[in-house]
Amino acid sequence: LHTKNQTPNSYPLGFFSCNHSFQIHDHDHLITTSSMANSSQVGVLVPLNGNLEEDTSNSIPEVGISKGINVLGRNVIPITDKRLSRKHLSVTVSSDGSAEVLVEGTNPVVIRSQDKRKKLLSREKLTIRYGDIIELIPGHHLFKYVAFDGIRKRSSPNTQKRPLIEGIQDEPLTQKRLRQVSEDEALARRLQIELNDDIHDKKSSAEAICNFKPPKDKLPQTFRLMRVRGLQPWANTSSVSVGDVIQGDVLIAILSNYMVDIDWLISACPTLKNVPHVLVVHGESDGRQEHMKKNKAANWILHKPPLPIAWGTHHSKAMFLVYPRGVRIIVHTANLIYVDWNNKSQGLWMQDFPWKSQDNSNKGSGFETDLIDYLSTLKWPEFSVKLPELGNFTLNPSFFKRFDYSSAAVRLIASVPGYHSGSNVKKWGHMKLRSVLQNCVFDKEFQNSPLIYQFSSLGSLDEKWMTELAFSMSSGVSDDKKPLGLGEPLIIWLTVEDISRAMPHIKTFTRYNGQNLAWFLLTSANLSKAAWGALQKNNTQLMIRSYELGVLFLPSSTKHTHSFSCTGNGSLLENSCGSSSKTSEVKRTKLVTLASVHSKKIDLPEVITLPVPYELPPQRYSSEDVPWSWDRQYKKRDVLG
């Protein structure tokens, strides 16, 4: 567990925090700054050009190295290349003068020592000597390590003079003073840039969620966080509650979930009292199931799907609401209980679809296939419904073929329990994700870019399965038809300090480069074989224990409008696929985080902003961070006392 969740005091989940994450971020920042300004300098990193000669352009200054830990990256080295991490590497100089390089970020470092070349990956370390060359990649930024001990002399550490190489005559006094002033000013500018960047990060991070106000026609292309009680209004910008979702003239409601509290659900959403037909597909155990039967309304049907393999659960969280105008499909991460909809970080996606017209009654789509295949596995008891002005229907999975999903903004990624073989291997779990991604084209920037696994529960894992999962999540090709290549998985796991604010229950998986996302999955699935499935029998069989459901956001080159609403008064003609003008240019959509500079261009159709509830790139655990575990005791009070 090498990255932490960044959950602040007043966000539903993990945007930058002025009170928590920046304490740690500032702490690291101050260590770096003070060590540069006040500690005894023992060496420098001298910038080199491509010919391995000292760079005389002065575009990049020398970087001072002090005793102890020197954390280096974009915060210290004034390089505009965003591929350089803020904490790319650290150089630790011991009291005996030896120096060791540790790769702090996800990007590698190459050490050239004499005729040897050694590539270091994340968290790998190597001892370096005078004259060794450090290459930061990508970008190929070169620095030579020069130690002062007996080779390069330096005057008082507080004078900030340019160190002199032995054998070179002293410069004239005036020139030396000018150079000293120049270097002092350069150091001051560098420290000010760091301070300004830090202030800007705090400000922009706090404002990011405030600015997340997608227009209604773009809501199906993104997801929203659920409202958390007790937070300031700005922290709940564009968030949703259960009453925002189940509303209007609902004729049929299918509520799919793991845990269901009927008493709370009715009190939180009185609209359900007036729905003629309610089917609850749940995963409750026998005791809770009996309580539900005693407390449900007469027109409610309870159904627990079959679980053919031990230790499986019905874990999917979704709603299917039928209206006179169409169907509303919601996929989310919250159990139907009070605490999940009020005190936890959750995500929710929703889109409305109209009834098919007679002209396209046989028209299908990838989304429709995903949906019908999944609903067919639930095996709920069919029942008859009479819908005013629409007629009599049998409510079974095929009923949902009556709606037009051609404008669907996502793909469904589902898991169902069983031993799947043949063509069904690619139908479910991580193999479904693999098959969808394999048919997608992504920008070149995502070649070998890292993966993010963020979840709230951890299964029993092994290296073989983790490689299997990473292979699926790394699928896809770039514009030049080359495979994207295997990405390094970074696990985001909440700290004890996070739990003092809001319990993250959301689950997300993504591939990123900077603030750009190749794809993004919001799902009920945690990191487990039971949820994602494990290949067996020489990869010819996929074994899954549980039901899961998620929505996959992908870049698209098809122009959609998503104005249709089951509860609004808009015309059905507003829901269309394709451009109204044959000459209008259709650009591939770009998925970005709230921290992206593109997120403010929310009116541009090609920019899709997703409220990713953690910092990218994720921050590693510090020595003071403690991973949260439910079975440990914590005596410190949380924010609620």
Image (cartoon, helix red, strand yellow):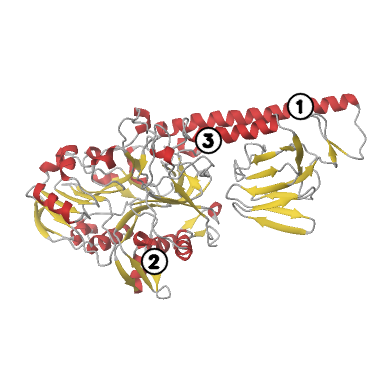
Q: Position of residue 409 (x, y in %)?
A: 35, 50
* Residue 585 appears in the figure: no
Give the SS element for disc 1: loop
Instruction: Evaluate if marks 3 and 1 touch, with contact meaning CB atoms under 8 Å apart.
Output: no
Residue 333, how many percent across, how many down? 31, 48
| Local SS, label 3 | helix
Q: Relative to residue 612, is residue 619 drawn left or right?
A: right
Question: Which mark sits nearer the N-terminus, 1 or 2?
Answer: 1
Q: Nearer the viewer, mark 1 or mark 2?
A: 1
Amino acid, disc 1: Asn
Tell me, yes or no, whether the two marked residues, 2 and 3, touch with CB atoms within 8 Å: no
What is the crowding at mark 3: few (fewer than 14 residues within 10 Å), some, or many (at least 20)? some
Q: Earlier in the sequence, mark 3 or mark 1?
A: 3
Residue 302: mark in rendering? none
Distance (Cα) linking label 3 and label 1: 28 Å
Mark 2 or 3, nearer chain start? 3
Looking at the rendered structure, the kind of residue marked 3 is Ile
The Cα atoms of the two marked residues, 1 and 2, are separated by: 60 Å
- Give the number of the disc on residue 24: 3
What residue is at 67 percent from the left and 40 percent from the top?
70
Query: What number is the disc on residue 534?
Result: 2
Image-quadrant location for residue 186: top right
For label 1, count other residues whose C-alpha is less than 10 Å away and answer few (under 14), some (14-19) or many (20+): few
Q: Which residue is mark 1?
A: 158
- Residue 380: where, in percent of width, then height? 17, 60
Residues packed near mark 2 inside 10 Å, few (<14), some (14 to 19) or many (20 plus): many
- Tell me, yes or no, if residue 191 can be seen here: yes
Circle 2: element type = strand
The count of marks equals 3
Tag 2: amino acid = Ala
